[in-house]
Amino acid sequence: MRIGWIYAPPVILTPFNVVKQAADLHSNFLCQKILHQYLTTHDPDDHIRHITRVYGRKCRLMCDLPDDRLPQLTRTTPEGGMFLMAILPPGISSRRVFDEGVKQKVAVLPGMPFYVDGGREDTIQLNFSNPDDEMIKIGISRLAGVIKGLVRQ
């Protein structure tokens, strides 16, 4: 569900509305009604506190496992969000990890699209918000196998 709002002075809002209408005529009314119903019957602050705890735990797990199983991998320690970025060992490209990962049933995103300048070919992005703890463990184990296999080549 993609719903948003903008608060701006008329000098910005007027041309923005023209461009928005040219792009999609109107926002999704059904989604707006669903979101309104949810926000009036649930506490969004409570939900944010809950997902912050859950994502924090999953993030720590996803950070700790590569430290143990892939010491040659350098990674970020996210302070928020849903992803961590990892730098691959020298000579290993993110595209090769992606291609081999698909074969081994582990999905990673090459890091290049997440840099303004096209980025580095030796970075991958890992999502910790979607998988449960067991899937994170399985995924990191599979990723370790992929990277170790590519290092040996």
Image (cartoon, grey):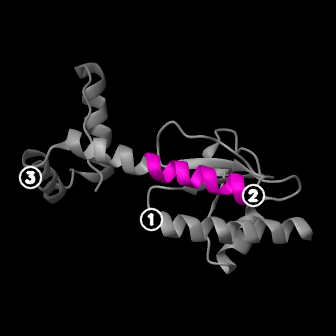
SS of the residue at dot 1?
loop
Main secondary structure found in the magenta portion: helix
**Range of magenta residues:** 56-69
49 relative position to 111: left or right: left
Label 2 amino acid?
Answer: Leu
Q: How many marks?
A: 3
Q: Which residue does the numbered mark 3 point to in the structure image?
A: 37
Relative to 13, residue 93 above or below: below
- The front one of 83 and 20 is 83
Residue type for callout 1? Asp
Q: Which mark is residue 70?
A: 2
Residue at 72 percent of width and 72 percent of height: 99
Q: CA distance from mark 1 to mark 3?
A: 28 Å
Residue 111 can be seen, yes or no = yes
Disc 3 crowd, CA 10 A, few/some/many (<14, 14-19, 20+): few
Q: Quadrant of residue 100?
A: bottom right
Give the residue type that dot 3 points to: Gln
The residue located at (48%, 49%) in the rendering is: 82
Residue on which disc 1 sits: 132
Task: Identify the residue at the far right of this view.
Answer: 153
| Residue 106 coordinates in the image, percent (x, y) | 62, 71
The answer to whether 147 appears left or right of 44 in the picture is right
Q: Is residue 40 above or below residue 151?
A: above
Residue 102, position as x, y percentages in the image: 65, 75
Sequence order check, earlier mark of 1 and 3? 3
What percent of the width, then of the height, locates residue 27? 21, 50
- Residue occupying the point 67% across, 78% down: 104
Query: Of 89 and 21, which appears nearest the observer?
Result: 89
